[in-house]
């Protein structure tokens, strides 16, 4: 367990989310990175229903996570992961090509895969009763499968994106996880195996448990 | 002019695109970064209509740019910008908070702003005759304006995102540029001024000219 109220690193997270979002809120990502390298972190839990006004100073869209590393603050999961990765070669390799590839895959996860899965979240969840969502779905699914197929080709028979597990796999696995429920990953056997491999890591399990434990049932509407 | 066939840095770009895409293809981003620091680069032009099969080894989705830095190859505009930025403090400041903020804004541009503008490109261009696109447009526009308003708040009265111009502004300006035609930026006066300030830079003009000059009219369909 790496949650430590006195740690120098602080991760901002939410005090409550609906059931469907549990295990998906993005503070999971830096929690996982910290767990992989045994770096203690404190939690800074903010109200989901009443975001504090000053939170927008550190995260322009009011989202989480924000990382506070001894007074240095930054937002965006990808940036936070790269910031943490610089602390340990287990997250960011020193070899020049491996480092470049790791940078590329972190961006690929958050710029080239996640946006389409988020739009599918709009279609299947937030806008599910709107006509455009029903009409949009097939072309979006086709596009996502195209991307996932190419990702699977790029992974090839490697265990991890850059050979050894590193921060790129934290980025990609937390994104791909969002495609499980729609049945998107299961159609790509090697991606499914890759995702299973990542999510079986003890550090991931600890990060997930810590996120789930941080929710306060009384901070949200009654079930 | 920094295009130099003998340069160590090579940027992969397309040999032709339709008129509407000229000035928007993403090799503009590393070209601009190179121009800001006077770093010569060679162009590696690939066929738009017949992407070479081996290109997918370096860019999983067949897109551009790919950067080849003396044999080190990487893809994703954001990753390439960060790789280039490490070469010069004019692109990546040394101060720890400024560096962290720069990382955050590069990711924000490509993960939190660009995806919505790309979806608007689907709506207004590629799917413009489909019913879902017409129905989807209003909520997408609302969402984009929400994001841009928050971005404008975060910019405040600063000239650039992190104070001095750096790689974060290359990332953000090349993204915001994609929202000009839909009239999205003009509604946010400080963002418009920021974008104008970025695009007035001589390095941007040189990068744009170089991209426009690289297209071969005979490589695409006749007008």
Image (cartoon, coloured by chain):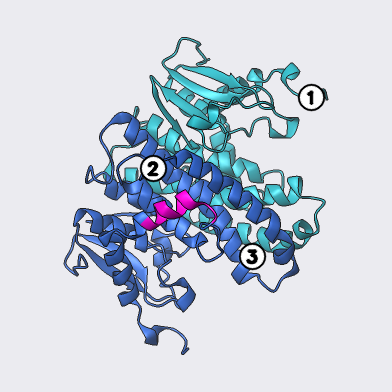
Chain colours: A cyan, B blue
Question: Are the residues flagged by discs 3 and 2 from a single subunit?
Answer: yes
Which callout, 3 or 2, points at the residue further toward the start of the chain? 3
Question: Are the residues flagged by discs 2 and 1 from a single subunit?
Answer: no
Q: Are marks 2 and 1 in contact (CB under 8 Å)?
A: no
Asked whether residue A91 is in view, the answer is no
Residue A139 quadrant:
bottom right
What residue is shown at x 55% (from left), y 62% (from top)? B183
What separation in Å lies between label 3 and label 1 (alpha carbons)?
A: 36 Å
Q: Secondary structure at mark 2?
A: loop
Label drawn at residue B123: 3
Q: Secondary structure at mark 3?
A: helix
> With respect to residue A23, does A97 lie above or below?
below
* Residue B7 percent across, percent down from the top left: 18, 63
Residue B210 located within the stretch drawn in magenta: no
Q: Nearer the viewer, residue B190 or A47?
A: B190
Magenta range is B187-196
Label drawn at residue A22: none
Q: Are marks 3 and 2 in contact (CB under 8 Å)?
A: no
What separation in Å lies between label 2 and label 1 (alpha carbons)?
A: 37 Å
Q: Nearer the viewer, residue A214 or A196?
A: A214
Residue, disc 2: B161
Label drawn at residue A221: 1
């Amino acid at each position: 367990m790496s949650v430590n109220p006195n740690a120098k690193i602080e991760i901002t997270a939410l005090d409550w989310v609906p059931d469907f979002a549990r295990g998906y809120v993005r503070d999971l990502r830096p929690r996982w990175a910290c767990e992989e390298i045994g770096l203690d972190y404190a939690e800074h839990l903010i109200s989901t229903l009443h975001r504090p006004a000053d939170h927008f100073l550190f995260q322009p869209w009011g989202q989480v996570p924000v990382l506070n590393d001894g007074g240095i603050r930054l937002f965006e999961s990808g940036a936070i992961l790269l910031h943490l990765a610089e602390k340990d070669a287990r997250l960011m390799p020193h070899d020049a090509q491996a480092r470049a590839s790791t940078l590329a895959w972190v961006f690929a996860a958050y710029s080239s895969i996640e946006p389409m899965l988020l739009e599918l979240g709009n279609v299947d969840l937030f806008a599910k009763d709107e006509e455009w969502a029903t009409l949009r779905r097939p072309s979006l699914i086709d596009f996502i499968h195209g991307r996932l197929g190419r990702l699977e080709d790029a992974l090839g028979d490697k265990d991890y994106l850059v050979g050894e597990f590193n921060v790129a796999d934290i980025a990609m696995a937390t994104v791909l996880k969002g495609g499980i429920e729609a049945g998107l990953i299961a159609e790509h056997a090697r991606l499914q195996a890759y995702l299973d491999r990542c999510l079986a890591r003890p550090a991931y399990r600890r990060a997930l448990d810590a996120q789930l434990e941080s929710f306060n049932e009384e901070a949200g509407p009654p079930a």
